[in-house]
Amino acid sequence: MFARQSRIVWFLLLFAVSAPALAVPVLVDGRWLESRLDDARIVIVDMSDDDGQYQRFHIPHAVRLPYQALLKQHVLGDPHKEDSPRYPVRLDDRELAGLLGRLGITREKYVVAYDDVGGLNAARLFWELERIGHPRVSVLDGGLVRWILDGRKVVNDVRKPKPAAYVLEAGGRANEASLDDVRAARDKRGALLLDVRSKEAYRGERKDPRSGHIPGAHWWEWDQAVAIDQGFTRREEGALRRLLRNAGLADTKRSVITYCQSGHRAAHTYLTLRSLGFEDVRVYAASMNEYGLLKSEPVKQGK
């Protein structure tokens, strides 16, 4: 009897410890973060669009991460030729781990990212951390804009993080789409392709035969998810689901691949869909920067 009771107690304790990790929200609000500013287990990451913004003021205890630090240049063709096409791609896992370590982030830390552009930059870090299986990461809904509108405290002291070792582990989320995945979706053998660029970019320019969209892709511009009049927070869920439904995306169990020009806006739509309960969402990180250069791959203009 004692052994059985001990097993029950052990199970309950294990559940109590693991449950918070399982319940980490995709988006958190200012009230939630304000009440945890002094929690040493949380690393707040400032990804405001302007480097100088962090110097002017930021959320207390935030460390700075420019969006461009998450990227490196890829050369298509001969790297020794100046005219070889170049476009930004994500860091490899070890490079990303090194970057996280320099920010003082370990796998034990709860990362909360924010920016001042409706989550556009913070979403990329969210996607990257989910990709490598970081246990706890959220984005501050509305970011610095909503934080200031709500009258919450900001500071201008530059925080120098204490470097740490970020240890990569297996088990990340399969949230990156390859070119082969995109081809399968294009040929209606896989996920729904979602082009989140502007309508003009989706339709293409007649003078540019490589402009337009990947055949079969639905159009849904990324910033439809942002309620600018509500402090750059995510649009109300009901309205957002209606907009997505109009784009042919209603079932949260549907497999989706998002893309744009560079993977930047596509990561924001990844964040949006994840916040709505979509589980099988992938980002084609190289997006049209890669696809548009591959003359063997078809593009479509118009609707």
Image (tube, rainbow, N blue to C red):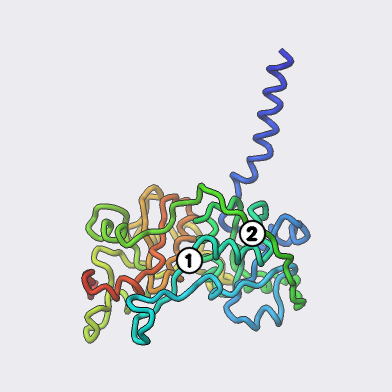
Q: Residues within 10 Å of mark 1 (few under 14, many from 20)?
A: many
Give the alpha-carbon distance from disc 2 to disc 1, as whole Å. 17 Å
* Residue 32 percent across, percent down from the top left: 69, 57
User: Residue furthest toward the top?
Assistant: 1
Q: Identify which residue, 73 or 301, lies in the foreground.
A: 73
Along the horizontal axis of the image, is 297 left or right of 235? left
* Residue 90 percent across, percent down from the top left: 47, 67
Q: Quadrant of the C terminus?
A: bottom left
* Residue 204 percent across, percent down from the top left: 27, 79
Residue at 42% in and 58% down: 176
- Is the C-beta separation of discs 2 and 1 under 8 Å? no
Disc 1 on helix, strand or loop?
helix
Q: Identify which residue, 265 or 294, lies in the foreground.
A: 294
Q: Tell me which numbered mark, 2 or 1, is placed earlier along the sequence.
A: 2
Question: Compared with residue 10, is residue 155 higher up or lower down, i.e. above or below?
Answer: below
Along the horizontal axis of the image, is 132 left or right of 297? right
Q: Residues within 10 Å of mark 2 (few under 14, many from 20)?
A: many
Along the horizontal axis of the image, is 289 left or right of 234? left
Q: Residue 64's quadrant in the figure?
A: bottom right
Q: Residue 281's quadrant in the figure?
A: bottom left
Q: Choose mark 2 or mark 1, whichever is in front.
A: 2
Q: Amino acid at mark 2?
A: Val
Disc 2 on helix, strand or loop?
strand
Which numbered marker is on residue 268? 1
* Numbered circles on residues, count: 2
Residue under pointer 2 = 111
Along the horizontal axis of the image, is 112 left or right of 171? right
Residue at 37% in and 50% down: 251
